[in-house]
Image (tube, coloured by chain):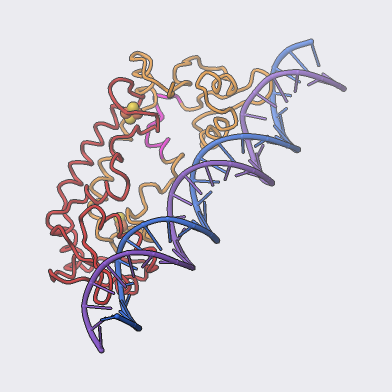
Chain colours: A orange, B red, C purple, D blue
Amino acid sequence: MYLVSKREKQRYFSIREMSETLDISFHFLTKALQPLTQKGILVSSRGPAGGVSFLKAPEEVTLMEIILILEGEDFFNSCMLGLDGCGLQRPCPVHGVWMDIKSILMKEFSSISLAMIGDKTFTQHLRLMNV
Amino acid sequence: MYLVSKREKQRYFSIREMSETLDISFHFLTKALQPLTQKGILVSSRGPAGGVSFLKAPEEVTLMEIILILEGEDFFNSCMLGLDGCGLQRPCPVHGVWMDIKSILMKEFSSISLAMIGDKTFTQHLRLMNV
DNA sequence: TTTAATTAAGACTTTTTTATCTTAAATAAG
DNA sequence: CTTATTTAAGATAAAAAAGTCTTAATTAAA
Ligand code: FES
Ligand code: FES
């Protein structure tokens, strides 16, 4: 959301500055952003005037993508009870329930872009931190 | 599900036996069942011929109840981003999304009883374990 | 070309969660 | 009443996750 608000293309935003603005540990934030960079959502640059910036336009990045990157690509493929393998071959008792809910969740998360949330965040002054 | 299958009322089922049937550590299973007993879903008896049994009929126990007991009573009241307090006073960027999804999840989980799942489990031979 | 600034990567530490073990309490049967 | 059996509760241990720190690599600017 912080980055979405900085709608300038073609420039990097310092993680240090972001961490101070959001009151998040610098090292923690750096680690948190790494998978997004690795998966091509962001692009980073080291050295002076370095930082991170969107590679994909936030209009094109869905919540679904972010969830899969942060929670693991098979977040929606695993058994709700934690059993090995989730599928019709050997369904567990809640498999049907989970499939129903899963499709709703995936549809919802896939329909929302970072830009959509970002816009709302800044027009409605939604909070990004506790204090 | 194991207990639901034992549709005899008025009798206790040994946790030891259950743990062997399901190939779950006895101590682990005992601990897992304790909150259900404490919250009045099950009733237990110590001593010879002791064990656990349903106190509430499985027809009257919803998945929602089980989730709240096992995951904590405010599982559906906390902020999706982990911020302190979730509510309209100080909503976070995904608050709206979360409220929408939450109501769907709660409705779904509240509409399903243990008996419903249990019946399906045993008519369709659904699995309760990995091997 | 050197230096300062900045992220990346991996090691390390701390915290939290999960699992196990030990002891206590309860109950039925002999 | 005593003993064997069984769950409860709490302590301990192990594993996993989260967070921090150190060092390396990259880059722009002087
Ligand atoms: S097998 Fe358990 S949710 Fe699919
Ligand atoms: S404030 Fe974050 S989900 Fe409600």
> In this picture, is D22 found above or below B38?
above
Residue displayed at 54% across by 21% down: A18
In the image, taking residue A66 as reference, residue B105 lies left or right, namely: left
Magenta highlight range:
A57-67
**Main secondary structure type of the part rendered in magenta:** helix
Image quarter for ligand 1: bottom left
In the image, taking residue B34 as reference, residue A27 lies left or right, namely: right
Residue displayed at 38% across by 15% down: A122
Residue displayed at 34% across by 28% down: B85
Q: Quadrant of the C terminus of chain B?
A: bottom left
Pick the residue in front: B10 or B3: B10
Pick the residue in front: A8 or B102: B102
Residue D3, position in %: x, y? 35, 83
Q: Quadrant of the N terminus of chain B?
A: bottom left
Instruction: Examine the image and state in which quarter residue B127 appears.
Output: bottom left
- Across the whole image, how many numbered discs are drawn on residues? 0
> In this picture, is B5 found above or below C3?
below
Whether A105 is among the magenta residues is: no
